[in-house]
Image (tube, grey):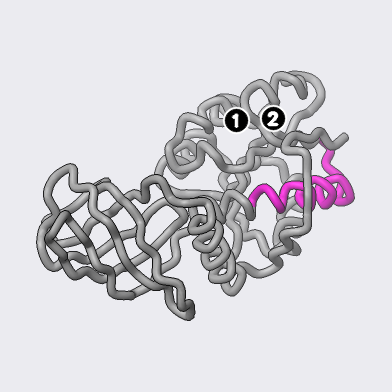
Amino acid sequence: MALESLLLSRDVEVFRVIRPTLEKLSIQVEVCQEARKASEILISEKFDAVIVDCDDLPGGLEVLQGLRATPSNKNSVAFALLNGKKTTTQAAFDMGVNFVLQKPVSTLNASRCFHAALNFMERERRRYFRQAVKMPVRVVLGEKELQATSTDVSEGGIALLVHQALPKNATPRLQFTLPDTKQALDLNAELAWADLKGRAGLRFLNVPESTLEFLEKWLNDQMEKQLPGSNPNLAGSGSESIQ
């Protein structure tokens, strides 16, 4: 499961430098050349990185300004491409940009920038990563116990197929054992959503630190099997300007 990026630009030289640099890091690239179209894409799709040509593409700056308001991409790692004449580096950072690249973009600077950002992209991917997993789950509501089957699990919750509708505002205990582990988990949860087909999403509550570490490690192990080029040892400051 490769990292995914959206590149908004019309600059042929930007394409020539940035696209192969991202692909060498196993980051898939979707190219968009119109700001309106990019805004539509950002509403409906999730990207690990969003690269915006702010100064040389009409509407590019507005896309960047609205990025943190999009539910799917408010935490995506954001890159601003600046021409040194319009938007300042500080102004870009004030809009929530994580990294700035000054044009003309060289292969060396692009490589440095995206290598520095890779750790942040992978960390954010882990945060929202959901692992598809089918396993039995006990749903305990007071003295009542329901049988369910999971469909996916994340750091923050679990999706279930429940054989009986859960009460609105239910706060059950969930008991399950993750595949290839021996540690039984017993977690408090609250109902986040449910539909008429017996599917429900539950949010974990007050997870003990040791249990959270165990869950995070299991999820990281699952993601490492799917994420090529992953390197947890890469580090970065969180905001950087590349000249």
Q: Residue at x 56, y 45 (%)?
A: 32
> From this viewpoint, is residue 190 visible?
yes
Range shown magenta = 102-121
In the rendering, at what x and y percent does residue 63 appear?
54, 30
Q: Which residue is mark 1?
A: 60
> Does 140 sit left or right of 30 as displayed?
left
Q: Quadrant of residue 146?
A: bottom left
Q: Which residue is mark 2?
A: 56
Q: Is residue 13 above or below residue 93?
A: below
> Does 70 sit left or right of 120 as displayed?
left
Front in this rendered view, residue 161 or 186:
186
Question: What is the secondary structure assignment of the residue under circle 1?
Answer: helix
Q: Residue at x 53, y 57 (%)?
A: 210
User: In the image, is residue 105 part of the stretch drawn in magenta?
Assistant: yes
Question: What is the secondary structure assignment of the residue under circle 2?
Answer: loop
In the rendering, at what x and y percent does residue 138 appear?
24, 67
In the rendering, at what x and y percent does residue 34 appear?
54, 38
Front in this rendered view, residue 133 or 62:
133
> From this viewpoint, is residue 13 visible?
no
Quadrant holding the C terminus: top right
